[in-house]
Amino acid sequence: MSEITVVHVVRHGEVHNPDGVLYGRRSGYHLSELGRQMADRVAEHLADRDITHVVSSPLERAQETATPVAKSHSLTLDTDERLIEAGNVFEGKTFGVGDGALRKPANWKHLTNPFRPSWGEPYVDQVVRMMGALDSARDAARGHEAVCVSHQLPIWIVRSFVEKRRLWHDPRRRQCTLASLTTFTYQDDRIVSVGYTEPARDLVPAHLLAGAKPVKGKAKAFGA
């Protein structure tokens, strides 16, 4: 008889980042007050689910998003380094609309190959580590449900891989809004379906929704 296991991969909530820095893997970036509301909304959304395992990226914003879910199910929050944000050479810099970053010659060498990509961790490497993390969560919650809290780019890349899409893409088209759930359903060891929900959509600023037109002065922090 087939065994069904569900793994929900959650993107963290909004981060307090008044300077619009592309924070990447840097420590010290916590959820904003709105982000904490988003985390609570995710916990409410999953309150009646059969969650037996909760695991998070080691970064603060992910841990803070995962904590209400773990608490609501009386579970210990685990950490998996493989769920971390993608590496990016522009970490610590502002890279938003209208800041002139693309006109700076020093940045051009990092923008030569969007297919790899040349500015950060290769997409293939992200697939390998994220699939490993998802499979570990599946094994920990066999026959039940697990929650993994991660970051926009790795989530989108592993979903693209599972759904057999090309890995290179337009960041504005990622369907991975703040505090969203990308849900992988396993039949035994095989993923048989992928779902997507946005339990905190009404809390997400309009310019941060998938497909929103960039607004000058409002850094979108793609991949966060």
Image (tube, rainbow, N blue to C red):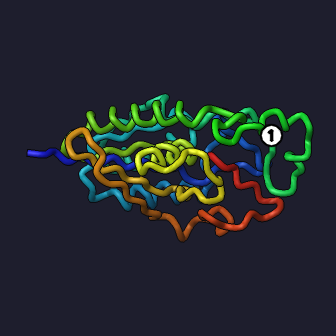
Q: Residue at x 50, y 40 (%)?
A: 63
In the rendered view, tell whether residue 33 sits above or below residue 83. Answer: below
Q: Can residue 224 be seen at all in this image of the molecule?
A: no
x, y percent for residue 72: 34, 50
What percent of the width, then of the height, locates residue 182?
42, 53
- Apparent side of residue 200 relative to residue 106 in the rendered image (left or right): left
Quadrant of the image occupied by residue 27: top right
Q: Residue at x 35, y 50 (%)?
A: 184
Q: Which residue is mark 1?
A: 93
The N terminus lies in quadrant: top left
Can residue 47 be seen? yes
How many residues crowd mark 1 within 10 Å: few (<14), some (14–19), many (20+)? some
Amino acid carrying mark 1 in the image:
Lys
Vertical relation: 34 (above or below) 8:
below
Q: Residue at x 82, y 62 (%)?
A: 216
Query: Residue 57 versus residue 191: which sits nearer the camera?
Result: 191
Q: Residue furthest left?
A: 1
Q: Nearer the viewer, residue 57 or 96?
A: 96
Label 1 element class: loop
Residue 66, position as x, y percentages in the image: 45, 45
Residue 176 in the figure: left or right of residue 2: right
Please name the residue shown 77% across and 59% down the image: 218
Location of residue 62 in the rendering, given as x and y in whole percent from the top left corner: 52, 42
Total tally of numbered discs in the picture: 1
